[in-house]
Image (cartoon, rainbow, N blue to C red):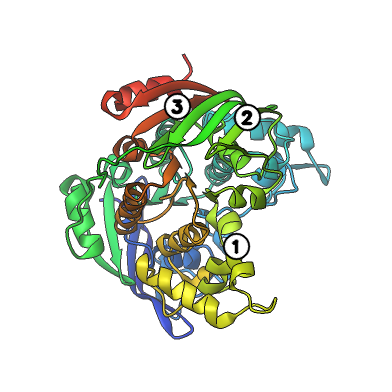
Amino acid sequence: MATPLLRISGVTKSFGGVPALTQGELTLRAGEVTALVGENGAGKSTLVKILAGVHRPDAGTVELDGRPLRVVSPRDAVRAGISVIHQELIAFDDLSVAENLFAHEMPTQHGLVDWRSMRLRCTELLAQLDLHIDPDSRFGDISVAQRHLVQIARAVGGQARIVIMDEPTAALSHHEAQRLLATVRRLRAQGRAVLYISHKLEEVLAIADRYVVFRDGAAVADGAIAEATRESLTRAMVGRAVNQEFPRTPATIGAEVLLVEGLARRGEFSGVGFSVRAGEILGVYGLVGAGRSEIMRTLFGAKSASEGRVVVCGRPLRASGPYDALRAGVAFVPEDRQNEGALLTRSIADNIALPSLARLARLGLCSPEREKQLAEKWVERLQIKCTDSTQHVENLSGGNQQKVVIARALETAPRLLILDEPTKGIDVGSKAAVYRLIDELAQRGLAIVMVSSELPEILGMSDRILVMRRGRLSGSFERRDASAEAVLHAALDA
């Protein structure tokens, strides 16, 4: 048994009198991968932020090499040899990829930034993750998945003894995730301690040596991963057994709701054509940079097409912006719920009512009471866990934040719902609830386009599957003909 490198004992943390951690216990050893699992709100991210120097614990001890460790700022964490890959991106959109990669410490020569060395090192680190982009590219212009990979490269490229990964593959496809896991194995072989936090239990079982389960702010189980199963981990996480089957009920497929012909956007995708019918779930799969999210943003009017035709319910869609798409009956739940999907510092009621303010207003003035009534309807229907509809979205778990974003989209009474990574970064229990909701919506006749990097999710929930590769459609499968091997083959370069 390796000597403990980091030991956390009895750590507690409350926010506004509400406990987030009540009994944080964790031990990390050099050359070992420890998985930390638990539902959203179990205290995992709070513990990570304590180790990263973002939060200070109310009580408890943290020891490094057997000596007390006091981390009161992110710089303290870096100096202690702790590198953190946060679930939500922490970056500078207006700086280059290289500048973001080395933001913590840029290489210098004679007191000046060594730009040539920084670009070369950036290219080398990104290549280890099979990411080939220009180091001088503006960070805000690359895809969400590419941004996550840059953040991962930044964390693993240094000399940190402890690497903490919070949902590192949430935005990655199966192919990129496998490359990330190979990187984790290299870190373990180098003698580093890795804390791996993920809701994807298949990854946990494949990569970890040991596991710790958090529930309701406390460590409730731990042990060797060789002695664990998906079922035992799930039971420890939620305190009960959870049905992991995808609740897809055969729906009655109705009239065509969406028709896309020859859609293109220069430099991102071209020649895209497909259709979606009422009651149908169309799954869209592909690797990072394949163009999936770019197509969805274009359909919603967040990006402009260079050519092509889009028809919604028999009428051409000329979306010069999201408002036009909403008026045509198109709703969109974006991949990045933190920055694009929700107003985190506003209440649940404010978020859900946002696209419906004109309808809810009285004499041109907002009606807080009507907004509250609207929000409470969705809180009850989607079982959003909160104190009440006035609670700020930033204080909800990831799964409940996602439900708020979905509720806002559904309040517009859409004919077509576009879901980009609808279960990204949410726990197993919340995933099951989102799957049931998606199935229910399809049963009611809503046409749904679902983009996902999780192959089991695509196979389990879709009536038809489209596969993207390098900005073009590379495969199409009916549910009965789809297999993991066939879909992956269509997504990978020949």
The residue at the point 44 percent across, 32 percent down is: 285
Res 494 seen here: yes
Residue farthest to the bottom, as pictured: 17
Q: Of helix, strand and loop, which one carries label 1?
A: helix
Discs 2, 3 touching: Cβ within 8 Å: no
User: Where does label 2 land, which residue?
Assistant: 309
Residue farthest to the top, as pictured: 494
The three-letter amino acid code for the residue at tag 1 is Pro
The residue at the point 34 percent across, 53 percent down is: 431
Q: Position of residue 277 (x, y in %)?
A: 42, 36
Residue toward you, 380 or 29:
380
Compute the Cα span from label 2 to label 3: 20 Å
Q: Position of residue 446 (x, y in %)?
A: 41, 47
Position of residue 116 in the picture relative to residue 102 (left or right): right
Discs 2, 1 touching: Cβ within 8 Å: no
User: Where does label 1 land, which residue?
Assistant: 355
User: Where does label 3 land, which residue?
Assistant: 467
Position of residue 304 relative to residue 16, above or below, is above
User: First in sequence: mark 2 or mark 1?
Assistant: 2
10 Å neighbourhood of mark 2: few (<14), some, or many (≥20)? some
